[in-house]
């Protein structure tokens, strides 16, 4: 990677991939940033939650221009393939170049938002770039709750313009984003002894594409938890199956790619059951043939477990998982092609004495977000779950007439001879929270092209990083 252009940006990104930085454990990347500031004699400031701002004064002739904030988040989504041995708390991401893309071996790459961090740091130390005063703001825990943005310390930024470096489509400039909220359901885990005279099987759903639960929710990707629930419900209805385990998904903001269930069926129907699972797996694959080319349903023999769910708990769990919505709920009438409202059935986990189901809702319309939250809550309450909602976060209302947007559009056309697309994004950016704290801010968001974000398929398109860098340099040099 260090030999790619622009070398300064890629070299810093290469360093960042070697620093572990899971959400809520950003201590190592925080130390890296502080050391970076010290080694380049740059002023820096840390707040109580762990956010860091690094400052650089204006170059000659730019002293009277408003300060520009460059903003990126320090944490990354930590997802890996089930067969990959990897410790996100200690191991460096294993990167490689595959044609036009940079990828990671079996894990998320962390270009979300490591490449944004790298661009901000590169601008701070590139003495060939002309710019007004710069504040590079690095926030913590964006991926699992926007904790850094929620708790941004007083006096961390004084700028008038903020460029968020956390977008994933080169050639597009974002001026708005969805708000979101998490809804968690808790069902008591009531079990009984696993019956004898049953054959037990582990059924694995894998090979799904997954992706970002906002940006990719309209791609038609399958949800592994939904597939596993459909298989379990069918097995219960047709073969009297007993459910012992259900485990699927991990992160609230990722469409789940893998899930497994452990089921037992009476031995006299075991052969028919196995055949039915294989046939139904093909039905599901056919249903998603265009969007899930590598989907797989595998059935393996399993040892008799100690317990299975009791009848009522199994009924409640499967009813909840079948009935709760997941996917696009509404498209925007104001911005054609934009998802307005969605929900994601993110994970299902068996804990010591309870089943925990995690979902997340997003919408660019606050009332629609609240209604989506109510829909999900209703499906869970109907079967007796306890339901808890997160505090949620606000959306970012577009300002199509801002000076910063006009400057960005002109810069893009000057550099590349075409107008960028200006749009909103169905994902949670920190900009809405910044606007609550600093209502005077004008903001845009742009970045290089990433695909497969929040999954081990995450990849960064090499050619777009150079365009991203040139646009950033041109905007800070021309904003007035």
Image: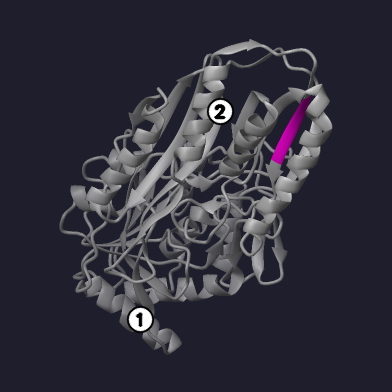
Residue at (44% x, 44% y) in the render:
325
Q: Secondary structure at mark 2?
A: strand
Quadrant in which residue 56 is drawn: bottom left
Front disc: 2 or 1: 2
Q: Quadrant of the C terminus?
A: bottom left
| Rendered view: 43 above or below 443 | above
Closer to the camera in the image, 164 or 292: 292
In which quadrant of the rendered image does the N terminus lie?
A: bottom right
Residue 245 magenta: no
Q: Which residue is mark 1?
A: 411
Residue lying at 68% horizontally and 42% vertically, measured from the top left: 205
* Residue 407 percent across, percent down from the top left: 28, 78
| Residue at the bottom extreme, as displayed | 417
* Residue 201 horizontal/vertical position (percent): 77, 29
Q: Is residue 284 visible?
A: yes
Which range is magenta? Answer: 200-204
Q: How many marks?
A: 2
Residue 140, percent from left and from top: 41, 42
Q: Position of residue 244 (x, y in %)?
A: 66, 22
Q: Quadrant of residue 83?
A: top right
Q: Which residue is mark 2?
A: 349
């Amino acid at each position: 990677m260090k030999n790619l252009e622009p070398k300064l940006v890629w070299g810093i990104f290469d360093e960042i991939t070697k620093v572990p930085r899971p959400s809520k454990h950003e201590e190592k990347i925080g130390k890296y940033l502080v050391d970076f500031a010290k080694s380049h004699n740059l002023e820096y400031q840390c707040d109580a939650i762990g956010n860091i701002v690094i400052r650089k004064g204006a170059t000659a002739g730019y002293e009277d221009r408003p300060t520009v904030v460059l903003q990126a988040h320090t944490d990354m989504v930590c997802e890996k393939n089930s067969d990959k041995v990897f410790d996100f708390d200690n191991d460096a991401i294993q990167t490689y170049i595959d044609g036009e893309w940079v990828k990671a071996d079996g894990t998320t790459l962390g270009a979300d938002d490591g490449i944004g961090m790298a661009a901000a740091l590169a601008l701070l130390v590139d003495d060939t770039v002309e710019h007004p005063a710069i504040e590079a703001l690095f926030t913590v825990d964006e991926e699992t709750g926007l904790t850094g943005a929620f708790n941004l310390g007083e006096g961390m930024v004084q700028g008038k313009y903020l460029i968020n470096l956390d977008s994933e489509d080169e050639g597009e400039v974002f001026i708005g984003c969805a708000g979101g909220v998490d809804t968690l359901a808790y069902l008591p885990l009531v079990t009984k002894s696993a019956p004898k005279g049953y054959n037990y099987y582990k059924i694995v759903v894998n090979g799904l594409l997954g992706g970002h639960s906002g940006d990719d929710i309209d791609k038609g990707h399958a949800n592994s938890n939904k597939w596993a629930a459909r298989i379990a419900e069918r097995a219960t209805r047709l073969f009297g199956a007993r459910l012992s385990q259900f485990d699927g998904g991990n992160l609230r903001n990722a469409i789940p790619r893998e899930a497994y269930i452990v089921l037992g069926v009476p031995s006299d129907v075991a052969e028919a059951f196995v055949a039915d699972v294989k046939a139904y797996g093909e039905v599901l694959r056919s249903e998603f043939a265009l969007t899930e080319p590598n989907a797989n349903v595998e059935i393996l023999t399993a040892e008799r477990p100690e317990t299975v769910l009791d009848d009522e708990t199994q009924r409640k769990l499967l009813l909840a998982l079948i009935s709760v919505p997941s996917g696009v709920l509404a498209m925007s009438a104001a911005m054609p092609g934009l998802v307005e409202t969605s929900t994601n059935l993110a994970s299902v986990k068996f804990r010591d004495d309870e089943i925990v189901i995690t979902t997340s809702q997003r919408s660019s319309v606050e009332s629609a977000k609240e209604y989506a939250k109510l829909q999900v809550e209703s499906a869970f309450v109907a079967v007796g779950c306890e339901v808890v909602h997160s505090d949620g976060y606000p959306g970012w209302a577009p300002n199509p007439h801002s000076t910063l947007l006009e400057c960005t559009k002109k810069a893009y056309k000057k550099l590349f001879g075409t107008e960028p697309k200006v749009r909103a994004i169905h994902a949670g950016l920190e900009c809405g929270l910044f606007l609550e704290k600093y209502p005077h801010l004008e903001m845009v968001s742009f970045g290089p092209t990433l695909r497969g974000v929040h999954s081990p398929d995450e990849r960064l398109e090499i050619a777009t990083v150079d365009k991203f860098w040139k646009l950033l340099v041109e905007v800070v040099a021309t904003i007035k």
